[in-house]
Image: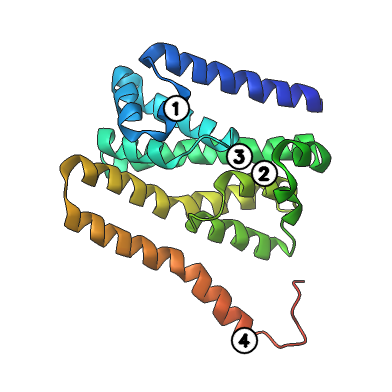
């Protein structure tokens, strides 16, 4: 695929999607950080609300500045925790795949100019190590979902491994964020507390594993195969 055409296609599709959502629900870009505004927009779509949520999640991943957490919270408030999580997972997975393939099509030089020097940190290691790195990053909210998707596309990680690691990793966060949305809609503070504790436990597991692995690894073997 021609690099300039790939960039143009993503920009056009992204702008067209945002413009359509804005026309359909009197929705502005500033509202993308407002769960209540997203909730109202999704409700305006009626039976096509799930498709609107999925489309917003795809845009949030591919178009990096758009936040995804408010979309997930709005989905939980409108559709409930589990149905909302399904729509969020579908959208996030599709967006991550598009970002991964787009990075492969563009190449490192073009992607670096587009997204900055953060991509230079990249991903190095064996296929298993790369796959685990992607999976672990999906569990950690402080690691950019979007940037990791593009960085993975520039690595040697196989597509099917990326897709599986992403899918498995986004399930806990999706369930948690849609849970928050549902809780805020019902003002059930105790459920929010238990949900927060559960997510903290899940997201801490990769860090504990990495710490355990680094302690077990012999000092003379500090590199991946």
Give the residue displayed 70% in from the left and 61% down from the top: 127
Give the residue displayed 75% in from the left and 39% down from the top: 111
Q: Is residue 210 above or below residue 116?
A: below
Label 2, label 4: how many angstroms apart (C-alpha)?
31 Å
- Per the rendering, the mark at residue 97 is 3
- Left or right: residue 211 compared with residue 198: right
For label 1, the crowd category at 10 Å Cα-Cα, with few meaning under 14, some 14 to 19 and many 20 or more, is: few
The residue labelled by disc 4 is: 216
Q: Is residue 121 visible?
A: yes
Quadrant of the image containing the N terminus: top right
Q: Are marks 2 and 4 in contact (CB under 8 Å)?
A: no
For label 2, the crowd category at 10 Å Cα-Cα, with few meaning under 14, some 14 to 19 and many 20 or more, is: many
* Sequence-wise first label, 3 or 1: 1
**Residue 106 is drawn in which quadrant?**
top right
The residue labelled by disc 1 is: 30
Give the residue displayed 70% in from the left and 35% down from the top: 102
User: Residue 7, percent across and down?
Assistant: 72, 26
User: Residue 154, percent across and down?
Assistant: 75, 47
The residue labelled by disc 2 is: 150
* Sequence-wise first label, 2 or 3: 3
Label 1, label 4: how many angstroms apart (C-alpha)?
48 Å
Q: State the SS at label 4.
A: helix
* Sequence-wise first label, 2 or 4: 2
Q: State the SS at label 2.
A: helix
């Amino acid at each position: 695929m021609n690099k300039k055409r790939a960039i143009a296609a993503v920009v056009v599709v992204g702008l067209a999607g945002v413009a359509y959502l804005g026309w359909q629900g009197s929705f502005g870009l500033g509202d993308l950080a407002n769960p209540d505004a997203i909730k109202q927009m999704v409700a305006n779509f009626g039976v096509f609300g799930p498709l609107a949520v999925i489309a917003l999640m795809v845009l949030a991943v591919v178009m990096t500045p758009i936040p995804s957490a408010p979309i997930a919270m709005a989905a939980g408030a409108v559709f409930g925790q589990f149905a909302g999580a399904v729509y969020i997972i579908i959208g996030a997975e599709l967006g991550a795949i598009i970002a991964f393939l787009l990075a492969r099509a563009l190449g490192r030089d073009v992607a670096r100019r587009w997204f900055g020097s953060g991509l230079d940190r990249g991903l190095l290691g064996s296929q298993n190590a790369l796959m685990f790195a992607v999976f672990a990053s999906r569990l950690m909210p402080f690691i950019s979902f979007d940037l990791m998707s593009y960085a993975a596309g520039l690595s040697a990680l196989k597509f099917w491994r990326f897709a599986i690691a992403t899918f498995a990793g986004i399930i806990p966060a999706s369930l948690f964020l849609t849970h928050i949305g549902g809780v805020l809609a019902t003002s059930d503070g105790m459920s929010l507390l238990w949900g927060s504790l559960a997510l903290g436990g899940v997201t801490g597991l990769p860090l504990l594993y990495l710490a355990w692995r680094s302690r077990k690894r012999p000092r003379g073997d500090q590199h991946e195969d």
